[in-house]
């Protein structure tokens, strides 16, 4: 096996040293649960193992956040908190119990075989008796043949900041007005769910797990359908200083195709980064898993903030492609285009 990248080795040393100090001070392990998903036969359970001061409630990271001051504290701690790598984690779901290890960054990403009906379920996750938390798991119906995968930044939410500052912004600038909804996108997603009730909905983003609570709250407050957020980790990997957002999206799309092979996805993204080519590449590899691609066209000022020029980073392609590829500047335009290709029903004039 190749030697890990020097940045990853430094991070591993830091985690061992700081973790040892915190254990000596009597800090405990706590889990931050994330929203998992799966089918009636196997699911993906997601969580993160962290250190917390002695006496911190076991469900601290699982409590709903109601006020902005509390959310600001949570966001700050999510970025400065110390992860607990390689810890044994136990999962109870569907009458079965599983044990596995978190990875070197404290992330628990477990695929477990279960027998569950479609719907909402709760997995109990713990490291030692007394710090149990519940992680939501959405089990999709195996009869589902259509699903929605959506990007977040610049697709459903605009922050009007350069892309490198987004993580900081989402974690520390918590006022609701700081993040703008892309016009028409909540309405579009609600319309999709009315016409395809019970279909899988997932949000695929290059954002860090650290901003999970803030993004979850934004989607809820603005009327987007609920669904798992598939984010990535913050920091170096075994191969580089920074994680590849593109590889994260490509790998996750392949996981979805494996988990739900009978689903054809509507892939929604924007032309400010690499969504057009990521989605097109997935459609080429897995044509049986793509219903259509919908790309939100950024304004010139948004393009400038996204990647430094006023022009799209990539050409999303023409609308007569297979699978269909539609583009528009907002949800209203995308709705019209999706109606035109027959994916959504046309509204009858009154």
Image (tube, rainbow, N blue to C red):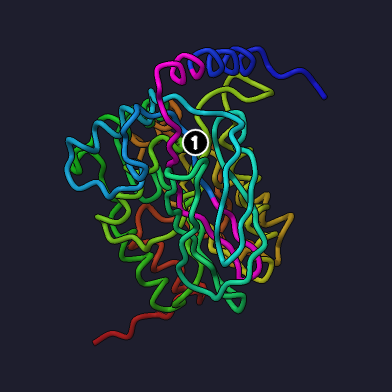
How many residues crowd around disc 1 within 10 Å: few (fewer than 14), some, or many (20 or more)? many
Residue placed under numbered mark 1 in the picture: 49
Question: Is residue 159 at least partly visible in the picture?
Answer: yes
- State which region is magenta: 19-45
What x and y, as percent, mark residue 89?
Answer: 57, 42
**Quick one: which residue is furthest to the right in this view?**
1
Please, is residue 283 above or below residue 188 in the view? above
Question: Is residue 322 at least partly visible in the picture?
Answer: no
Q: Nearer the viewer, residue 128 or 22?
A: 128
What x and y, as percent, mark residue 15?
Answer: 53, 19
What x and y, as percent, mark residue 136?
Answer: 44, 58
- 94 on left or right of 282: left
Please, is residue 57 above or below residue 51 in the view? below
What x and y, as percent, mark residue 255?
Answer: 66, 53
Q: Nearer the viewer, residue 194 or 183?
A: 194
Residue in view at x 38 percent, y 65 percent: 189
Residue in view at x 53 percent, y 24 percent: 235
- 70 on left or right of 77: left
Q: Quadrant of residue 40?
A: bottom right
Quadrant for the N terminus in the image: top right
Quadrant for the C terminus in the image: bottom left
Please, is residue 176 above or below residue 340 in the view? above
**Quick one: which residue is furthest to the front in this view?**
129
Is residue 117 covered in magenta?
A: no
Q: Nearer the viewer, residue 89 or 5?
A: 89
């Amino acid at each position: 096996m190749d030697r890990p990248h020097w940045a990853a080795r430094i991070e591993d040393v830091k985690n061992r040293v700081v973790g040892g100090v915190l254990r000596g001070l009597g800090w405990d392990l706590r889990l931050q649960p994330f929203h998992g998903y799966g089918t009636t036969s196997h699911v993906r359970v997601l969580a993160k193992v962290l250190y917390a001061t002695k006496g911190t409630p076991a469900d601290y990271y699982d409590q709903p956040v109601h006020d902005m001051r509390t959310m600001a504290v949570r966001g700050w701690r999510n970025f400065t908190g110390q992860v607990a790598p390689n810890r044994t984690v136990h999962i109870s779901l569907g009458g079965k119990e599983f044990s596995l290890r978190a990875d070197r960054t404290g992330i628990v990403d477990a695929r477990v075989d279960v027998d569950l009906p479609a719907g909402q379920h709760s997995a109990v996750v713990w490291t030692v008796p007394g710090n149990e938390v519940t992680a939501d798991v959405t089990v999709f119906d195996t009869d589902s043949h259509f699903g929605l995968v959506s990007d977040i930044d610049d697709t459903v939410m605009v922050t009007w900041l350069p892309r490198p500052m987004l993580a900081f912004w989402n974690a520390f600038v918590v006022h609701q007005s700081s993040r703008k909804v892309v016009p028409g996108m909540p309405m579009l997603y609600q319309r999709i769910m009315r016409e395809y009730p019970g279909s899988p909905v997932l949000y695929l983003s290059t954002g860090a797990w650290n901003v999970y609570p803030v993004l979850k709250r934004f989607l809820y407050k603005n009327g987007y359908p609920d669904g798992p957020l598939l984010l990535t980790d913050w920091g170096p990997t075994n191969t580089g200083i920074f994680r590849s957002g593109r590889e994260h999206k490509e790998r996750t799309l392949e996981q979805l195709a494996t988990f739900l092979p009978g689903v054809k996805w509507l892939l929604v993204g924007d032309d400010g980064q690499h969504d057009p080519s990521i989605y097109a590449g997935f459609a080429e590899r897995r044509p049986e898993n793509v219903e259509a691609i919908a790309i939100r066209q950024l304004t010139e000022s948004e393009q400038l903030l996204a990647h430094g020029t006023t022009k799209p980073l990539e050409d999303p392609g023409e609308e007569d492609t297979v699978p269909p590829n539609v583009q528009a500047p907002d949800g209203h335009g995308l709705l019209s285009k999706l109606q035109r290709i027959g994916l959504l029903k046309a509204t009858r004039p009154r």
